[in-house]
Image: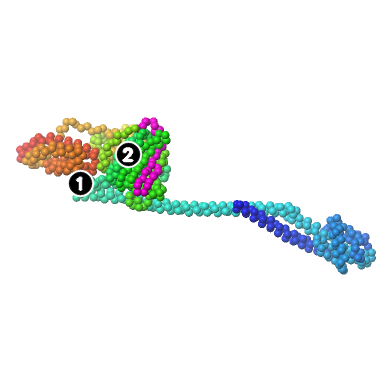
Amino acid sequence: MSVRARFILISLSITILALLLFTSVMHGRVIKYKHAQETHLSRLYLQHLHKKMAGLNRLDQIKAAFKKEEVKELQTIQIYAVLDENNNEKYISKNKDIARSDLTKIITEIKNKKFEGPLEIDHSPFFWIAIGFDKGELQNNNLLMIYSLSSTAYSEFFKFFGFPLIISGFLLCWLMVWASIILSSFIVKLEKQKLKVSSQAADVERARDEAMHANLAKSHFLANMSHEIRTPLTAIIGYAESSLDVDQTLEERSKATKTIIKSGKHLLHIINEILDLSKIEAGKLEIEKLPFSIVHVLEDINQIVSNMAYEKGLNFKINYVFPIPDKIYSDQLRIKQILLNLCSNAIKFTDEGSVLLNVSYSDETSILKFEVVDTGIGLTEEQKDKIFSSFEQADSSITRKFGGTGLGLMLSKQLLEMLNGTLSVKSTVDYGSKFIATIKLEDADQTGYIYEIHPKETAASGNLSNVAAPLLDGKVLVAEDNKDIQGLVNLLLKKTGVEVNIVENGKLAVEIAAAENYDLILMDLQMPVMDGKTAMKQLISQSCSVPVIAMTANAMKSDREECKQLGFAGFISKPIDRNDLHTVLLQYLKPAQRSENNDTLITSNLLENDPELIDLIDKFIGRLPGMQKAINDAYDNNNEEQLSGLIHQMKGVGGNYGYPALTELCAKIEFQITSQNTETISSLMQEFNQMIEEIISGYDQNHEIARKSLSGS
């Protein structure tokens, strides 16, 4: 039984008991009150009659007197009678409401009484007075007058509250019932309110606990993030300062440069993760779905992750379960980000063994599946529940041992969900983990399938790419307010051979572009005086036809779309990637044209002051073809140690024999060998062979310089 039903039942019971008690008390009080009132009035009236009738001795006189003296207030008198000397009834005038049995009982009782004057007999519910006569016709007779108190008293009682008793009682019960219902409803509401308040208190307590937990997690995250940011910054600042040391060897300087680049990229990765997290929490992370080749993405991942695995002595391999779609319709950048996160995470937590990336596709479900399998430390069930949460790693000891922000897996999971995919994990402690990423593809079967892939050889000797700058012709205007970025852009552009002019704001760029002819303009978007967007509008209003490339750290899709709408021809995000810069330059500038007729001969700068050294220089030039062949053979055989030694030797003798340009070139090659920048070494080797040919071709010119110097002396 509910609380409300129990309360109503109890209330009804109490109401009935209270009503009965009230009825009993009120009945006695009303009777007593009416008795007292009417008895008093009747006594006064009957005493008056007694005096009036005391001198009468005939019955008819008494009747007439009684009738004459009757008053309205005493119309309740029902009976009067004349009794003989033995108190037997002699004459009776009665009302029909009086029963004969009651009258007989009264007369019988009077016979047993001896009275003088008026006699009051309290015989509820009647009241009577007997008056005795002592002379005339009525000598020794008594006058008995009776009136009923019950009639008046009960009629008053039955008109309690102005209504008959039964109606009054019903109304009273009805009011009590409704009062009980209202009160019970109020109590039920109070109970509900109490429960609600209790629930709210519990919610507040739970929210407080969650907030405390979230604040604690964020505090740990910020502390960890501070460590993660300061660590690469410490390396960057420390190695940059050490590079200024004059006693630093080439190998140490190369190592410092590689560390600075690696730490800078790691710091950029951390910042990108934080920005992605803030975008997701703000609901502003954009997904761009376009068709692309998944194989090309996996080839890029293979090259990057293979280098990471090589540094830890691990094996990395991509296993294809054919057939797979030739092209898919999704976000290429985010898929690459997810797979790199999963693979780099697997390598980070694997000390020995291998990391595999399995790729498969189900034609029935249109689901592309990636499985990253490692032989690392594995996860417990409790740890598996934490790794996809914000700001958390499996436990603090893992953070201390392996580092990391704890954002990679959470970001990967949310990105996959935005791509209509899922991320799950299966793991066994000390045996390894398997992270399973699935993506529901759209229109995956419109471009056919791939049934075989011939993997390219991946050089797993380093992870720093330093592509040689292309040689270009053209004139480039750069609008950039930051001095450091001005220097960097100038350095990168100068290596391509183009003519560069740098200004500090958009206003100057607009003015100079109107006065001079340029082949390309690189425009920063945020500058003082006039920003890049306003400058672009000014250039369009001046009918400027020079392509303008936006440079900005705001690299969201909306920023790219805005730049496109403003009329920018392209977009380069900061930090500037030299490969992206080279791609833009190649698109808008022409390759440099080299003259096939090389009239430039390189001679020794020692002969003008000391022509007698001609014999030594001739011997050096005579040895050059052999030295050149040895260097080229070492390069062709990928013998880095031998190549480095021969180039170092050539760097020393070149300056000794008056060829500082050869020394400078060999120093560049030696640095790139130490840095393991394969593509740059290839470009410099071509320049090296060209310089050797120019030195050899300058043999006769050396003798001419020597003869002129001797004759002049």
**Horizontally, is 489 left or right of 421 in the view?**
left
* Local SS, label 1: helix
Question: Which numbered dot is residue 163?
Answer: none
Q: Main secondary structure of the magenta part?
A: strand
Q: Residue at x 89, y 63 (%)?
A: 143
**Horizontally, is 670 left or right of 513 in the view?**
left
Sequence-wise, the earlier of marks 2 and 1 is: 1
Q: Residue at x 81, y 64 (%)?
A: 122
* Local SS, label 2: strand
In the rendered structure, which segment of residues is drawn in magenta? 423-450
- Residue 48 vertical position relative to residue 535 in the rendered view, above or below: below
Q: Residue at x 30, y 45 (%)?
A: 353
Tell which of 72 and 625 is nearer to you.
Answer: 625
- Residue 4 vertical position relative to residue 463 in the rendered view, above or below: below
Q: Position of residue 534 (x, y in %)?
A: 35, 38
Check disc 2 and report the residue beneath it: 318
